[in-house]
Image (cartoon, rainbow, N blue to C red):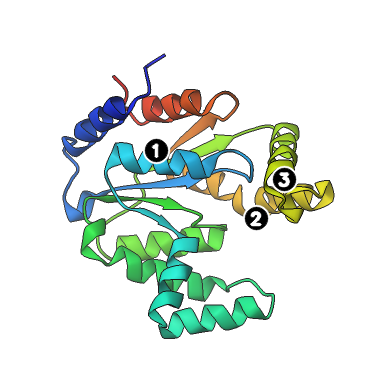
Amino acid sequence: MWPLTAESLLAAREHFLKLPTRSHAMSQIIVLFGPPGCGKGTQAARLKEALGVPHVSTGEMFRDHKRRNTPLGRQVEEILAAGKLAPDSVTDAMVKERLAQSDIDPGVLLDGYPRNVAQAEELGRNLAASGRSVQAVVSIEVPTEVTVSRILKRGQGSGRKDDQDEAIVRNRLSLYEDVTAPCIPHYETAGTTVHRIDGVGTMDEVTTRILTALGLSQ
C-alpha cells in the first residue's frame, strides 16, 4: 500500500497542480459523498490537503453567513431555530455565491452538497453558466450495519445522544439512502466519472483508495 504521510499528501498535491486542466473553465471540481459514519469528514480533510483546493461544505457556509450576518445567514438561522431544514433555494444560493469566488478557480472539493438530485441539477446549471462541470464524484461506501456500529461506538465516547439511539442512527442512514444516494446514479447517467470507494478499513487505507482512484497516488 502507498505509504500515507504528510510528504505523500504533498506529493499528491504537487501532482494535482501539474494536471493540464487548471483553467477556470476546466477547474477540478470534485464532489464527495458518503453516509453518516463512513469517515467522510476525515477523508475530506485529507483530500483538501492532497488536492490543495478549497474544501467547501454546507455547514461551513452556513456558519460563515451567520458570522457575517448576511441576509442568507439570518434566513438560515431563523429556519434552523424553527427546527426546519434549509430549503434547496437557500442552500443553492449560498453555494452559487461561494463558487463565484476567485479561490475556487483552480478547483474545489464539495462536501455535503448536493444533498439531493434537485440540488445536483442546480449545481450543474450554475457550473455550466461559467463553462465548468463536475469532473469526478467520490462515493465512500460502507455497509449499513458497519456504519451503525461505528456511530453507536462513537456515541459512547462523545456522549452525543443522537449517536447513541440506534433508531435515530438508522433513520439518518435511511434518509441518506433515500435522498442523497440517488445523486450517484444521477452523475453516472450524466457521464461524470464516479469512483465508488470501499470505506471499510483503516482511514489510511481508504485515503489511499481515493487518491489512487483520482490518479494521485505514486
Image side of residue 104 versus residue 56, left or right: left
Position in image of residue 177 (x %, y %): 68, 47
| SS at badge 2 | helix
Image side of residue 119 versus residue 107, left or right: right
The Cα atoms of the two marked residues, 1 and 2, are separated by 26 Å
Residues marked 3 and 2 touching at CB (< 8 Å) = no
Residue flagged by tag 1: what amino acid is it? Arg
Residue 189 visible in the displayed image? no
For label 1, count other residues whose C-alpha is less than 10 Å away and answer few (under 14), some (14-19) or many (20+). some
Image side of residue 85 versus residue 56, left or right: right
Query: Quick one: which residue is furthest to the top in this view?
Result: 1
The Cα atoms of the two marked residues, 3 and 2, are separated by 24 Å
Q: Which residue is mark 3?
A: 155
For label 2, count other residues whose C-alpha is less than 10 Å away and answer few (under 14), some (14-19) or many (20+). few
Residue 46 has which mark?
A: 1
Residue flagged by tag 3: what amino acid is it? Gly
In this picture, is 60 found above or below 9? Answer: below
| SS at badge 1 | helix
At 30% from the left and 31% from the top, the residue drawn is 9
Image side of residue 170 versus residue 25, left or right: right
Which is nearer the N-term, disc 3 or disc 2? 3
The Cα atoms of the two marked residues, 1 and 3, are separated by 23 Å
Residue flagged by tag 2: what amino acid is it? Val
Position in image of residue 100 (x %, y %): 28, 67
Residue 39 visible in the displayed image? yes
